[in-house]
Amino acid sequence: MTHTWRPKTAVLASLALAVPLLAALSPIAATAATAATPLPSLVVNEVDASGVPQDWIELKNVGTAAVDASGLVLKDDNDAHRYDIAAGTIIQPGGYQSFDVADSFGLGKGGDSARLYLNDGSTLIDGFTWTSDAAPATWGRCPDGTGAFAVTASGTKGAGNTCAATTPSPTDPTTPTVPDALQWPGGADVSTANVQNFFGTNMSGLSYELGANGSPDTLWAVQNGGGDGDVSKLPGGPTTSAMYRLQKSGDNWVPATDNGWGLGKTLHYTDGTGQPDAEGIVHTDAGTFVSTERDNANNGVSRPAVLRYDSTASGTSLTASMDWNLTADLPTVGANLGLEGIAFVPDSYLTSKGFVDEKTGAAYNPATYANHGDGLYFVGLEGTGSIYAYALDQTDDTKFTRVATIESGFPSIMEVQYDPEKRAMWAVCDNTCGGQFAVLDVAQTGAQAGHFAVTTVYNRPAGLGDFNNEGFVTAPQALCVNGVKPVIWADDDQDDGYSLRAGTIDCEAAAAVTTPTDPTGTPSASPVAGASGSGSGSNTITGATGSNTATLANTGAEPAVPAAAALFVLLVGAGALVVRRRRARA
């Protein structure tokens, strides 16, 4: 059969080829093409992810007419996080407008995005993505408003960018993982461990309590900001932090229902007010201790503190009995870069290892610190990636002493856990570092003798996604079965609707207590990350090498040129074919 090629058919066929090609080459342009109105002449112009005093995103109007930005949406790299620009926001031609986004989301120094969308929340106008940022300044377009993003000479919020003479790289812009980290010491499989969409976002620290006398085990957890799940409707409102007492029901951890725990308990400071931004938790015989970043009732101000609670108290809220405000003693960080994890490390372990007290420069002597209990509290500071050991006076919360500063080797730290079976400490980094884990122990020989140093770094299990895991805990040795025991993670972003996930880790027999080696050399005030202990294979924490340029998110402007050219060529070809067919018939 002879097929007649009709001109109309040719045009339609050409369009059928052109439209998918255009969409493939420039999905943003394709989205804009279907919109009723063109994209506004706004660009993301400068970004500050330092958190000092707050993270912000600056927009610039590069067009010749004023732009009404009312209702446009700013996001980070998580589509669930959004900042809606207020009604009446007009940006004049060549003008700037900056937005403090910390109340809606934080911008990660270890990698994140700043994206601007139309009111529909799905049509991208412009954006910028970075993978690592330790720069003292900001990211900005250089030249101002039109160039690629680079590290600026200084932040210029609401004004033209001050571009550096050169374009220094803040850090290697690859995820700062340890390339020779070891395989996870447990099973590769990971399963979800809570009812889907139950807790919402912002689940953070975890602590495991083994049940006694037939009572069930308890997983203690804290959630900052109240989350957005079914149990977030707490008395203090959506910014309220909560503590949970969770018990196992089948494969899931669910809130205990007795003594007011059914919806978790809201947390307050010692005066019964405030909304502590709870990030870490450790349950001890002396009470339940919570590490916090700030008061969410004044969330633009950093206030790193450790709070002690009596978790046996009745009611639906808990008021702290002690509040060790560490703001003046710790390095200055942004309001959203404060204390994350907290661990209790017993004096018996520290003295058996010959731990050096950096305050005195001698071997740690518990008797030096009156009323501190029988151990020290180690807290991780997100903004520095370091761990700080404190003796906390349990009778007077104005008294505390920093005993050591420990480098975790990670740019950020989200959880700290003492492991009595390993007789070592875990430092956990989230998706800032590809979900890696460092094990630290007190070095017995060499320059770092008497100081904590990284001995091993592990990759996350193969079955665990690169989630924003801010909580981590290993189960007690009593739960060891067939050589493994449970381990649990808390996902701050509630990826796929799950805040908790469970896996396994290899069991270890408790190590014998040995007489410590006398520390040699002058104690270092700030131990070097990655120093090895006696006879141990040590991984020095370094960033992987790579290109020193950040990635600019696809805004739809650049790819539109080749896409339009391709479309033009196809349409011209179709038109030529029509003309030729008409001439042939003439």
Image (cartoon, rainbow, N blue to C red):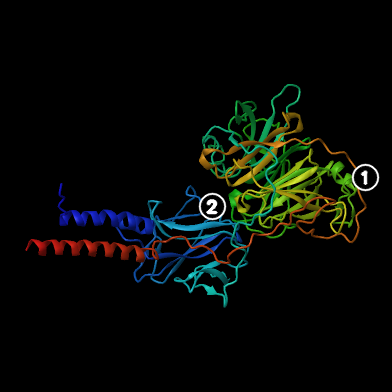
Which residue, as the protein is rendered here, is positioned at the far bottom? 165
Please indicate, yes or no, whether residue 34 appears anywhere in the rendered image. no
Task: State the residue in front, 126 or 176.
Answer: 176
User: Is 273 on the left-hand or right-hand side of 112?
Assistant: right
**Where is 62 relative to 344, above or below?**
below
Quadrant hosting residue 524: bottom right
Quadrant hosting residue 35: bottom left
Please indicate, yes or no, whether residue 489 appears anywhere in the rendered image. yes
Give the amino acid type for the residue marked by disc 1 in the picture. Thr
Give the amino acid type for the residue marked by disc 2 in the picture. Phe
Task: State the residue in front, 243 or 528.
Answer: 528
Residue at horizontal 53%, vertical 37%? 233
Number of the label disc, if any, that sits on residue 257: none
Q: CA–CA distance between discs 1 and 2? A: 49 Å
The residue identified by callout 1 is 515
Earlier sequence position, callout 1 versus callout 2? 2
The residue identified by callout 2 is 105
